[in-house]
Image (tube, rainbow, N blue to C red):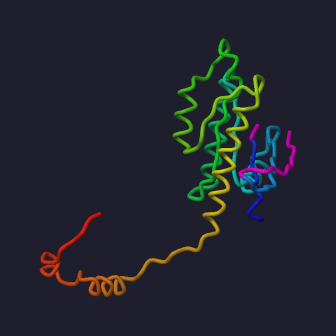
Amino acid sequence: MDMNSLQFLIIFSEFLYKQSVNFDNVMTQVEILDTSQCEDHCCLQDHINWADAYVVVYSVCDRTTFEVARKLLETVSHSKGARRAPAILLGNKRDLERGRQVAVDDGHETSLQFRCQFYEVSAAENYVGVSLAFQSLMREARAAQQLRTLPVRRKTGPALSKMIGMVFGRGDKADRKKRPSLSI
């Protein structure tokens, strides 16, 4: 995949949206797959494997959507395992406080449990909160993508470590006590 191409999975009609965005002065091709109508677990699993990052949306006015969001985060977490991918838990309809069924603390706790970002927004009031959440996720996804391209460092064996220690004076414990040290 191109270093300037990120794929996001929005778990909220299965539609694929493609958009080029100039983000942090880099033109990036973003593909967003909306899977809210994906009822088949296998279908969802394919989409989870496809994406570089995840946006899981729930309504703060509907506890059921929050529970579904938790299950989806759990599925993503189990699917990705140690290769944890960037994700956002996004509570929508923050402007409808009178109908709130999901407390802000519930969202925070869930985001801590699944080690993902958390935002509460009102898409109806303005796009700024949603935009900031996506920008944050794009930065995290780009950083994770760049980390995956770095070469893997190998550990040095005990013989090499011992030899390096002897060269720099760590061979004899009695000798170590006599040598001055400097801490900065």
Magenta stretch: includes residue 17:
yes
**Helix, strand or loop: magenta stretch:** strand
On screen, 77 above or below 37?
Answer: below
Q: Nearer the viewer, residue 148 or 9?
A: 148
Residue 147 position, x and y percent, is 60, 63
Which residue sits at x=12%, y=80%? Answer: 174
On screen, 177 above or below 38?
Answer: below
Quadrant, the C terminus: bottom left
Residue 54 position, x and y percent, is 69, 46
Quadrant, the N terminus: bottom right
Which residue sits at x=60%, y=70%? Answer: 150
Which residue sits at x=63%, y=57%? Answer: 143
Please identify the quarter of the rendering in which residue 97 is found.
top right
- Tell me if 16 is positioned left or right of 118 in this view: right
Please identify the quarter of the rendering in which residue 120 is found.
top right
Residue range in magenta is: 11-24
Q: Nearer the viewer, residue 88 or 134?
A: 134
Magenta stretch: includes residue 133:
no
Residue 59 position, x and y percent, is 70, 26
Q: Residue furthest top?
A: 98
- Tell me if 23 is positioned left or right of 144 in this view: right
Residue 25 position, x and y percent, is 74, 54
On screen, 96 above or below 22?
Answer: above
Which residue sits at x=81%, y=55%? Answer: 29
Total number of numbered discs in the rendering:
0
